[in-house]
Image (cartoon, rainbow, N blue to C red):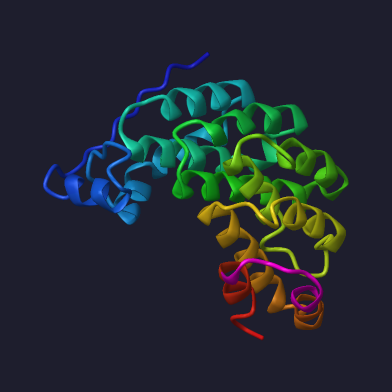
Amino acid sequence: MEKLNFELVGNAEIAPAMAHYMKDKFTFIGIKSTERKEQSKLLLRKSTKLPSNTVKAWVSELYGRTFREYQYVAIDLAIRNLRKWNFADIVTFKQFVAQKSWWDSVDAWRTLFGKYVKLHPDEKAKVFELFYQSDNFWERRVAINLQLMEKDTLDTEMLTKAILYDQNTDEFFIQKAIGWSLRQYSKYNPNWVSQFLKTHELSKLAVKEGSKYL
């Protein structure tokens, strides 16, 4: 297996502000998104020509590093190689949702899982069940927002199950996710979202977010 040889070059002057923006939960090397993508461009390009096991090992290694930006690169790497993955790989990647969890990493992982189920719609239910009713609320956030970017393919029964399971959960990031999922779907199917809001008692935050475009 090819060894990972990759290091980011950051700016110590901006690192404290970046950490503060993330509630000082993580240590940053100090590199903004556009620059991070530029520095990792060759790595991502190279990864597409490598075996899936090597890429998965690199994702794991990067995710385990101290600086937060390496978690972002790890997720970028997983997304870039989307077409390599099968369901077993998705199960492997699930573990990272509950590691070093905050909205930035969780929502980035959700992008991977959401893209995967669009590419493999016959496996959507299996992927959903990985996160639905989890003891970890970050994983349940993924279940709620799994179909976030879908329109005509969105399974309303699945979305309803995810929302109602956490209907009364007193967790900001869960209620925000409920509102986000409804708001996004309302762009495509406002009648369904309007009816859902009328027939279900949701938190003020979820209703505010979900009805934004109605």
In front: 168, or 161? Answer: 168
Q: Position of residue 189 (x, y in %)?
A: 78, 78
Q: Residue at x 57, y 53 (%)?
A: 170
Q: Is residue 57 above or below residue 182?
A: above
- Indicate yes or no whether the magenta region holds residue 120: no
In front: 12, or 42? Answer: 12
Q: Is residue 174 above or below residue 126?
A: below
Classify the position of the C terminus by image quarter.
Answer: bottom right
Quadrant hosting residue 5: top left
Q: Position of residue 57 (x, y in %)?
A: 53, 21
In front: 157, or 187? Answer: 157
**Residue at the extreme bottom of the image, as rendered:** 214
In front: 213, or 121? Answer: 213
Q: Residue at x 40, y 44 (%)?
A: 41
Q: Is residue 66 above or below residue 142?
A: above
Q: Residue at x 70, y 77 (%)?
A: 186
Q: Residue at x 76, y 56 (%)?
A: 164
The span picked out in magenta is: 196-204
Q: Position of residue 1 (x, y in %)?
A: 53, 13
27 left or right of 4 in image: left
Q: Position of residue 60 (x, y in %)?
A: 50, 24
